Image (cartoon, rainbow, N blue to C red):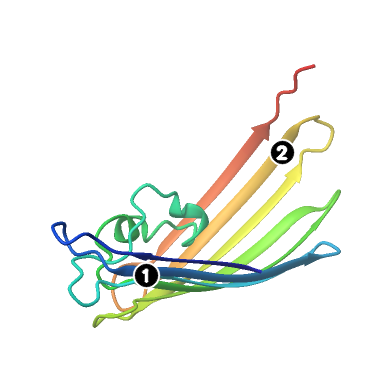
Amino acid sequence: MQTDATLNYSLDDSPKIDASYYDLALGANISGIIVGAEYEVLGDASGDSTKGFTTPLATLHKFQGWADVFLGRTGGSNNDGLADASLKVGYAAKGFGKLLGLYHKFDAVSGDNSDLGSEIDVLYANKVPGVNNLKFLAKAAFYSKGDTGSDVTKFWAQLDYKFKTK
């Protein structure tokens, strides 16, 4: 189980920043069966605050869905905040590789357009048979819009070669 929380505040002579962040995660990997649930909130611009919780230097691809729909939102103003409830299921075993599925439900913390959509992400990774140090990875992201925006579908295929030195 993992929990993270933070609260930002500013000095009297600087812009008002008063935004919260928290992340509650619970997961397990038992005999190759992977399960997890997570609830992450990047707070809104509340009270006298001029902007919500942002992560301008973060790589959000790993955290808010692989379709990267919220890169501009959480890296910029994020005035309405972002709540991400997600579930993860998968299986990993030697010889089989790793198969993983994630479901995200996105909502604004405040504002008129509270439904920000949902996303399904799928990943498969495995060693390439007969080729030492070579792995194959395939990923897909299917984002369905909420009150605003548009649907997004993305696919990736990747080969990773690991160089070894003696």
Local secondary structure at mark 2? strand
Query: Furthest-left residue in view?
Result: 13
Q: In this view of the protein, can residue 136 be seen by the observer? A: yes
Q: Earlier in the sequence, mark 1 or mark 2?
A: 1
The N terminus is located in which quarter?
A: bottom right
Q: Nearer the viewer, mark 1 or mark 2?
A: 1
- Labels in figure, total: 2
Outermost residue on the front side: it is: 12
Q: Which of these two is toward me, 91 or 109? A: 109
The x and y percentages for residue 69 are 38, 60
| Percent coordinates x, y for residue 65 in the rendering | 48, 61
Reply above or below: 119 against 62.
below
Q: Position of residue 137 (x, y in %)?
A: 65, 45
Is 129 displayed left or right of 24 in the figure? Answer: right
Residue at 45% of width from left, 66% of height from top?
A: 143
Q: Quadrant of residue 99?
A: bottom right
Name the amino acid, label 1.
Ser
Q: Residues within 10 Å of mark 2 (few under 14, many from 20)?
A: some
At a point 34% along the width and 60% down the height, the residue shown is: 74
Identify the image quadrant of residue 20.
bottom left
Q: Residue at x 80, y 16 (%)?
A: 166
The answer, for residue 34, to whether it is visible in the render is no
**Dot 1 lies on which element?**
strand
Q: Are marks 1 and 2 in contact (CB under 8 Å)?
A: no
User: In this figure, which residue is indicated by the disc labeled 2?
Assistant: 135
**Amino acid type of disc 2?**
Lys
Left or right: where does residue 137 sit relative to residue 48? right
Q: Provide residue 16's location: percent of width, then percent of height.
A: 19, 64
Cα distance between the residues tagged 1 and 2:
39 Å
Q: Which residue is mark 1?
A: 20
